[in-house]
Image: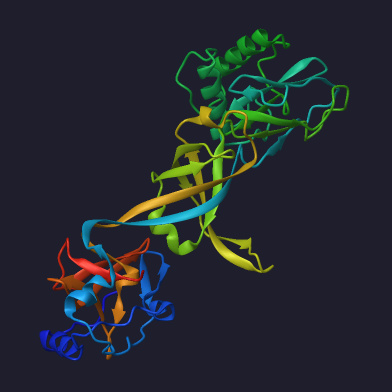
C-alpha cells in the first residue's frame, strides 16, 4: 500500500511543529497505529495521528540518546507464511475383481506394485496390475471393436516385452499372440483373450496400504486398499496466498522430533471448503509438497508437520521495520531518524508489506540511516 504523496512543504511544516526538546518515549498503545495486517502480498496500516511532542527540557543530543534505533537496509522483501500439514502416502483407493473364487494369496502392507505385478491370487491364479487411465470395461478378444482400451492393453504388453509391433487401437492376431505369451509367463491358460477381472488398470504404480480381505475369503470388488508410492505433505492455505505458492516453490518442513527437510510444491488445487476452529466452513487452497529427500521421512507415516513458504515480493528494496512508521495528520506516513545527534521527522511513501518490514518507495531516506523504533 502506498501513502498519499507528500510535498516538501508538508515535511517542513511537520518538522517546524516539533520543538527541539526531548520527546516522550513511544507508548505501547500508540505503536498500534503503525501495525500491519499482512493479507496476501500487501498490508494495511491503521492510520492514527501521532500526538504532539512535549517540551521536557534537555538538548537535541540528549533527545537522540534517549531513543532506540535500527538501520535502514536495502535488500529483498521476503514474505513468509507458516502452515501445518500432514505427511503420508495420501488417500487410499480400494481395488478388487469381478472374478468369482477364493482369495489364495495377498501382498503385505507396504508392498509396491508396478506394471505386471500380481495384486492377489484368486483360486491360485493371479490378478494382474497394468498401467493406464481407462478401466477394463469389456473382455479383450478377437472380433472386438477398435478402441483406446485396446491401445492401452497393447502398450502394456509391449512394455512387458510381449507385443512386437507398434501398439494401436485394433485387436488383431498379433494382439492375441502377445496375450498368449503373457498368459504363459503367468501360468494361465493360453486363450489369447482376457476376461473381465483378470487385470486391473491403475494410472501409476501403487503401494499396498491395507488388506481388506483375509486369505480364504471370497473375492470381491474390495480386496486391497492402495495409495501413492511416495510420501507427500498435504496442506491447506488461505486462497489469497496462491501467488506465493506456485508449483516449483521451495518449502522448508519441520518433521516430528525437530528435524528439517526441504520440499517442493508439486501440485496446487482449486479452493475447497474446510472446517474451521469455530465449527463453520472456510475456503482453503490445497497444496501438495514432495520431499526433496524422501529418505528423510523413513519411519514416518500419517504424521503432522509444519512448514514455511518464503517468496521474494520485491528485489533490492529500501526497507524499514513496520514499527518505525508514524501516521501523519491528514494522511501519509513518516519515520524519525537520528541525524547529527538530533531526531528528525522524514516523510515517506510506502510500497509492499511483508514479514514485519515495509518497502519505502519515496522520501528522503537512504540505506544506513538510523530510524527510531520502539524500545
Res 231 seen here: yes
Q: Residue 9 is drawn in which quadrant?
A: bottom left
Q: Is residue 147 visible?
A: no
Residue placed most toward the observer, 147 or 285 = 285
Q: Nearer the viewer, residue 171 or 9?
A: 9
The relative height of residue 83 versus residue 144 in the rendered view (above or below) is below
Q: Quadrant of the C terminus?
A: bottom left
Residue lying at the far front in this picture: please name it.
Answer: 58
Image quarter where the N terminus lies is bottom left
Above or below: residue 30 compared with residue 203? below
- When asked about the image quadrant of residue 225, the answer is top right
Above or below, 285 against 351 in this view is above
In the image: residue 164, left or right of residue 348: right
Between 280 and 351, the one nearer to me in the picture: 351
Q: In the drawing, does residue 89 fall left or right of residue 71? A: right
Q: From the viewer's perspective, is 95 left or right of 88?
A: right
Residue found 88% across the figure and 26% down from its top: 217
Q: Residue at x 54, y 55 (%)?
A: 236
Q: As drawn, is 212 to the left or to the right of 186? A: right
Where residue 284 appears, x then y in whole percent? Answer: 54, 60
Residue, x 56% and y 64% (percent of image)?
A: 283
Q: Is residue 323 above or below residue 153?
A: below
Amino acid at each position: 500500500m502506498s501513502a498519499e504523496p507528500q510535498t516538501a512543504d508538508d515535511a517542513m511544516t511537520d518538522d517546524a511543529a516539533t520543538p527541539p526538546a526531548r520527546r516522550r518515549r513511544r507508548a505501547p498503545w500508540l505503536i498500534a497505529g503503525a501495525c500491519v495486517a499482512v493479507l496476501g502480498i500487501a498490508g494495511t496500516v491503521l492510520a492514527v495521528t501521532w500526538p504532539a511532542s512535549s517540551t521536557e527540557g534537555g538538548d537535541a543530543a540528549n533527545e537522540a540518546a534517549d531513543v532506540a534505533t535500527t538501520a535502514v537496509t536495502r535488500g529483498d522483501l521476503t514474505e513468509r507464511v507458516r502452515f501445518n500439514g500432514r505427511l503420508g502416502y495420501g488417500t487410499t483407493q480400494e481395488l478388487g475383481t469381478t472374478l468369482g473364487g477364493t482369495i489364495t494369496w495377498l501382498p503385505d502392507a507396504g508392498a509396491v506394485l508396478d506394471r505386471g505385478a500380481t495384486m492377489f491370487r484368486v483360486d491360485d491364479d493371479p490378478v494382474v496390475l497394468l498401467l493406464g487411465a481407462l478401466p477394463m470395461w469389456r473382455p479383450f478378444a478377437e472380433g472386438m471393436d477398435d478402441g483406446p482400451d485396446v491401445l492401452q492393453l497393447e502398450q502394456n504388453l509391449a512394455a512387458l516385452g510381449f507385443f512386437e509391433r507398434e501398439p494401436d487401437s485394433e485387436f488383431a492376431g498379433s494382439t492375441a499372440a502377445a496375450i498368449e505369451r503373457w498368459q504363459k509367463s503367468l501360468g494361465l491358460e493360453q486363450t489369447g483373450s482376457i476376461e473381465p477381472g483378470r487385470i486391473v488398470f491403475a494410472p501409476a504404480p501403487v503401494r499396498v496400504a491395507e488388506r481388506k480381505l483375509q486369505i480364504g475369503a471370497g473375492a470381491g470388488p474390495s480386496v486391497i486398499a492402495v495409495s501413492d508410492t511416495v510420501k507427500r505433505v498435504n496442506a491447506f492455505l488461505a486462497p489469497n496466498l496462491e501467488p506465493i505458492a506456485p508449483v516449483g516453490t521451495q518449502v522448508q518442513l519441520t518433521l516430528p522430533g525437530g528435524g528439517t527437510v526441504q520440499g517442493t510444491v508439486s501440485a496446487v488445487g482449486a479452493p475447497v471448503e474446510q472446517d474451521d476452529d469455530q465449527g463453520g466452513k472456510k475456503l482453503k487452497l490445497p497444496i501438495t509438497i514432495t520431499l526433496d529427500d524422501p529418505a528423510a521421512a523413513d519411519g514416518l507415516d500419517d504424521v503432522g508437520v509444519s512448514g514455511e513458504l518464503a517468496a521474494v515480493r520485491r528485489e533490492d528494496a529500501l526497507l524499514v521495520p513496520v514499527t518505525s512508521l508514524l501516521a501523519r495528520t491528514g494522511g501519509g506516513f513518516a519515520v524519525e531518524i537520528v541525524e547529527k545527534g538530533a531526531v528528525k521527522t522524514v516523510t515517506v511513501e510506502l510500497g509492499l508489506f511483508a514479514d514485519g518490514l515495509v518497502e519505502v518507495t519515496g522520501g528522503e531516506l537512504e540505506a544506513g540511516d538510523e530510524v527510531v523504533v520502539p524500545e
